[in-house]
Amino acid sequence: MNAPSVSKSSVSKSSDRPYFDLPHPWIHNQTDPYAIASGGGWYVAPHGKVLGWIQQYDEYPPDSWQVVHLFGVWSHGVDDDGRRLWLQSRKTLGSAVAFIRQHAGELAALSARIGADPSGLR
């Protein structure tokens, strides 16, 4: 499966996704060498520049009793309404990190186009 291109026109707003600051009790069990834990989520900063954020959340499919744990990939920076932009979700932390690293150039350009991230990290 090919990863979708990250462009301003293909970026969804986070309004249909869970709020970024809701930690889960099982979040501390997840690790990745490129993901830096911060405030109930992770950020990915190869070469010292933050490219994106990852937040774990639950999805409840309407036709199933099973909860699906997903890792949402979010922009480093905010839109005009002060919200990070949701880019896509992956089933593992490692695959979310891999998406960010594979799309480093596109994510850096996106971060330059949108508002400064409220984390204060660069």
Image (cartoon, rainbow, N blue to C red):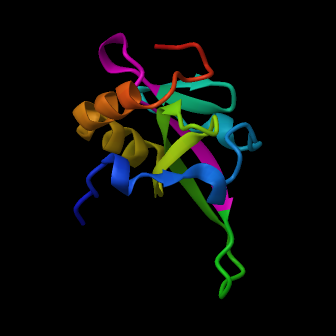
Q: Is residue 52 magenta?
A: yes
Residue 41 painted magenta: no
- Does residue 4 sit above or below 55 in this rendering? below
Give residue 51's quadrant in the image.
top left
120 vs 39: above or below = above
Q: Position of residue 47 (x, y in %)?
A: 30, 13
Task: Farthest residue to the bottom: give it.
Answer: 63
Seen from the viewer's position, the closer of residues 26 and 79 is 79
Q: Which residues are magenta?
A: 44-58
The residue located at (73%, 37%) in the rendering is: 21
* In the depicted structure, whether residue 114 falls above or below residue 12: above
Q: Quadrant of residue 70?
A: bottom right
Q: Residue furthest front?
A: 80
Q: Residue at x 77, y 42 (%)?
A: 25
Q: Quadrant of the N terminus?
A: bottom left
Relative image position of residue 64 (x, y in whole percent): 66, 84
Position of residue 79 measured from the top left corner of the image (x, y, whole percent): 54, 38
Residue 116 lies, in percent from the top left, at 52, 21
Count all numbered tags in the image, as a single digit. Answer: 0
83 lies left or right of 111: right
Front residue (pair 38, 119): 119
Left or right: 37 as drawn, with respect to 10: right
